[in-house]
Image: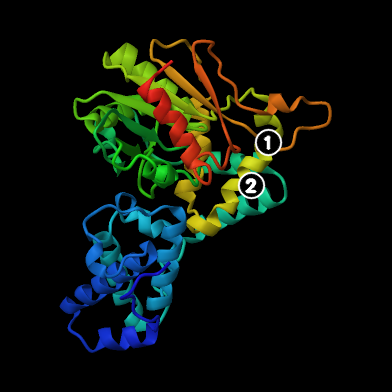
């Protein structure tokens, strides 16, 4: 439900207003616009309810509300910003700067302000989409892997520069902290955990950590070791000396397991626990049968997240190759395995439906089954997922 104070969408009127003002006053006008639209999307009464320096995720935005804000902002400005512009720019202040720059470019030439994709990106991304729609998911990934092979790599935190920073999703008195890892999919990112994180508000400190290499200009990890060193530093920085539990959804659980092993055996600072949310292994029957569905889902998410560029797409198969040697060794870390109650793809004739579910690979894992399927555990069924997590955190075992 929209709150009060949002201006009527009239991009021509806005552009006339800006054209009549000195350039140094544009940002104030556009800040008003962004904050009032953000307040309307979240159901607040006015722009004053939104802190321009607070992260969108901390303010309560998820993928759907980010899409609403993007749509409203495009309608009000005449721009063509992707939904990812909301999360990529972290907070309203960052989004205001981008909108100001885009409109400054657009007004003199009366053209679309959205930066057009390069010819190379357009060719690569369109070939990927065509292959997926034709049912050739494997070929689509081989194409992207060739692109990833040309991208720069990092072998250490020093080569990457600044390690990724977590985004806070909730806060509360209970400990340990919960640190969520993004999945290595084109549609992955900290926004994946927004709805789940919201369930812990006023209960527990929850944050989400992005993976390096999915943004334009970011290098890719050269190996699993390089990745875990970087993520290990990022997690310990985010924990601020307090006990923490790692959470990985889907293939993010593989990263969580590898990272927990690094923190336990190499860094000597193990997490207090590990939570695997419907994490399949490559050899699982569901991965063989449902691979096309998974890649198709990635493409469908563009309707919410905006069109992926070549950086975001090519990072995906690169991460698959980095993780393909995954060794599910036994950890000393208590582990909760959350299993979806329903398969995400219909089992072929003669295949037991139970084989289509994710199962723990270690008898020491605590198995809990949660209502929903693979794609709904962190979205529509986030309340049930959060309850199972909180029950285990309070009384593990």
Q: Which of 6/44 is in front?
A: 44
Q: Position of residue 353 (x, y in %)?
A: 73, 28
Q: The C terminus is located in which quarter?
A: top left
Q: Which of 137/21 is in front?
A: 21
Q: Is residue 126 left or right of residue 351?
A: left
Check disc 2 and report the residue beneath it.
Answer: 296
Q: Position of residue 103 (x, y in %)?
A: 32, 75
Mark 2 → mark 1, Cα distance in angstroms: 10 Å
Q: Position of residue 169 (x, y in %)?
A: 32, 43
Q: Going from the N terminus, do you reach mark 2 or mark 1 first?
A: 1
For disc 2, the neighbor class at 10 Å (few under 14, some 14 to 19, many from 20) is some
The answer to whether 222 is drawn above or below residue 48 in the figure is: above
For disc 1, the neighbor class at 10 Å (few under 14, some 14 to 19, many from 20) is some
Q: Position of residue 325 (x, y in %)?
A: 52, 20
Residue at 41% across, 73% down: 79
The answer to whether 15 is drawn above or below residue 52 in the figure is: below
Q: Secondary structure at mark 2?
A: helix
Q: Is residue 356 left or right of residue 338?
A: right
Check disc 1 and report the residue beneath it.
Answer: 290
Q: Secondary structure at mark 1?
A: helix
């Amino acid at each position: 439900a929209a709150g009060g104070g949002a201006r009527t969408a009239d991009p021509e009127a806005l552009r006339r207003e800006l054209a009549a003002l000195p350039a140094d006053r544009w940002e104030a006008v556009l800040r008003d616009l962004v904050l009032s639209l953000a307040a309307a999307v979240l159901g607040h009464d006015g722009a004053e309810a939104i802190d321009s320096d607070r992260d969108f995720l901390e303010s309560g935005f998820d993928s759907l509300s980010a899409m609403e804000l993007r749509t409203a902002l495009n309608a009000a400005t005449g721009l063509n910003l992707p939904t990812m512009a909301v999360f990529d720019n972290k907070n309203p202040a960052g989004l205001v700067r981008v909108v100001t720059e885009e409109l400054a470019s657009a007004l003199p030439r009366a053209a679309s302000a959205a930066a057009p994709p390069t010819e190379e990106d357009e060719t690569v991304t369109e070939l990927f989409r065509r292959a997926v729609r034709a049912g050739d998911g494997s070929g689509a990934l081989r194409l992207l892997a060739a692109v990833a092979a040309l991208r720069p790599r990092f072998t250490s935190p020093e080569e990457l520069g600044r390690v990724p920073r977590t985004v806070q999703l909730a806060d509360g008195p209970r400990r340990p902290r919960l640190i969520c890892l993004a999945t290595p999919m084109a549609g992955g990112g900290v926004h994946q955990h927004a709805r789940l994180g919201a369930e812990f508000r006023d209960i527990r400190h929850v944050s989400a950590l992005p993976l390096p290499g999915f943004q334009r200009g970011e290098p890719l990890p050269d190996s699993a070791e390089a990745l875990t060193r970087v993520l290990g530093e990022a997690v310990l920085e985010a924990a601020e000396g307090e006990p923490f539990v790692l959470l990985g959804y889907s293939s993010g659980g593989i990263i969580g397991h590898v990272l927990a092993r690094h923190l336990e055996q190499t860094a000597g600072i193990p997490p207090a626990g590990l939570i695997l949310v419907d994490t399949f292994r490559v050899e699982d029957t569901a991965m063989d049968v449902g691979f096309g569905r998974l890649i198709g889902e990635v493409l469908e998410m563009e309707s919410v997240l905006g069109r992926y560029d070549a950086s975001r797409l090519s990072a995906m198969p690169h991460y698959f190759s980095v993780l393909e040697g995954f060794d599910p060794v036994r950890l000393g870390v208590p582990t909760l395995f959350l299993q979806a109650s329903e398969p995400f793809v219909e089992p072929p004739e003669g295949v037991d439906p139970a084989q289509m579910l994710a199962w723990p690979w270690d008898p020491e894992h605590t198995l809990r089954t949660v209502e929903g399927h693979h794609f709904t555990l962190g979205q529509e069924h986030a309340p049930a997922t959060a309850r199972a997590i909180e029950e285990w955190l309070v009384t593990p075992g």
